């Protein structure tokens, strides 16, 4: 995995994830990452797919190395992002979950449940996600292929 200061990271949230996203954005920028913020840009009520889809598209097209989505449960962002081919979004509330998602599944979008994860824990989770490399290997490649091709098993 690239060092944090070489990563281009897409961010997206709905109103429930806006505060945590804003804090994480400042942290990532201080650490030297390039951050593309796909919104939302306030705590006004909004719909998560409006922001999750552009974030996932940027990851899908390789315009960003990774994506991080924030909503109350993490579910909405994850569901929307996972509709995109070659996006493997994961909801994590513990650092080890993020580490395993990267290592074994080459997850490229992290979805954080802003209603359940404190900011300090979110930073730990993100650190694990952005610093863990994909392990690779035949069995993991086979599983990832099945994710992208659900009719082939």
Image (cartoon, helix red, strand yellow):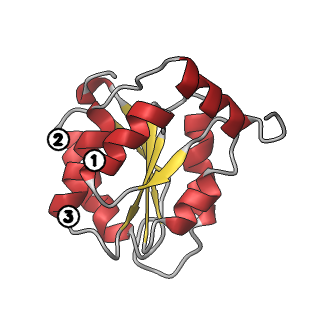
Q: Which mark is residue 119?
A: 3
Q: Which mark is residue 30?
A: 2
Residue appearing at x 44%, y 37% in the figure: 66
Indicate the quadrant containing the N terminus: top left, top right, bottom left or bottom right: top left
Locate residue 138 relative to residue 4 in the image: left or right: right
Name the N-terminal-most of marks 2 and 1. Answer: 2
Residue appearing at x 37%, y 40% in the figure: 100
Locate residue 104 relative to residue 76 in the image: left or right: left
Residue appearing at x 30%, y 69% in the figure: 19
Q: Residue lying furthest top in this view?
A: 137
Locate residue 118 relative to residue 67 in the image: left or right: left
All told, the count of numbered labels is 3
Which is more toward the observer, 72 or 94? 94
CB under 8 Å between callouts 3 and 1?
no
What is the quadrant of residue 121 in the picture?
Answer: bottom left
Q: CA distance from mark 3 to mark 1?
A: 16 Å
Residue pointed to by mark 1: 96
Residue appearing at x 48%, y 59% in the figure: 39
Residue 130 in view (yes/no): yes
Name the N-terminal-most of marks 3 and 2. Answer: 2
What is the quadrant of residue 99 in the picture?
Answer: top left
SS category of the residue bearing label 2? helix
- On screen, 65 above or below 36? above
- Residue 107 in percent (x, y) is at 48, 39
Locate residue 53 relative to residue 8 in the image: left or right: right
- Residue 58 in percent (x, y) is at 57, 38
Which is more toward the observer, 18 or 89? 89
Q: CA distance from mark 2 to mark 1?
A: 24 Å
Question: Depth-wise, is mark 3 or mark 1 nearer the camera?
Answer: 1
Name the N-terminal-most of marks 3 and 1. Answer: 1
Question: Depth-wise, is mark 3 or mark 2 nearer the camera?
Answer: 3
């Amino acid at each position: 995995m690239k060092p944090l200061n070489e990563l281009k990271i897409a961010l997206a949230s709905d109103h429930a994830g806006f505060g945590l996203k804003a804090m994480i954005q400042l942290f990532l920028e201080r650490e030297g990452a390039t951050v593309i913020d796909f919104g939302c840009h306030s705590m006004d009520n909004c719909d998560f797919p409006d922001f999750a889809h552009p974030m996932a598209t940027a990851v899908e097209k390789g315009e960003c190395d990774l994506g991080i989505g924030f909503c109350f449960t993490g579910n909405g962002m994850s569901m929307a992002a996972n509709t995109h081919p070659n996006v493997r979004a994961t909801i994590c509330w513990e650092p080890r979950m993020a580490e395993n998602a990267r290592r074994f599944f080459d997850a490229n979008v992290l979805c954080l449940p802003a209603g359940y994860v404190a900011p300090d824990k979110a930073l730990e989770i993100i650190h694990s996600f952005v610093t863990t490399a994909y392990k690779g290997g035949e069995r993991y490649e086979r599983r990832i292929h099945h994710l992208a091709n659900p009719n082939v098993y």
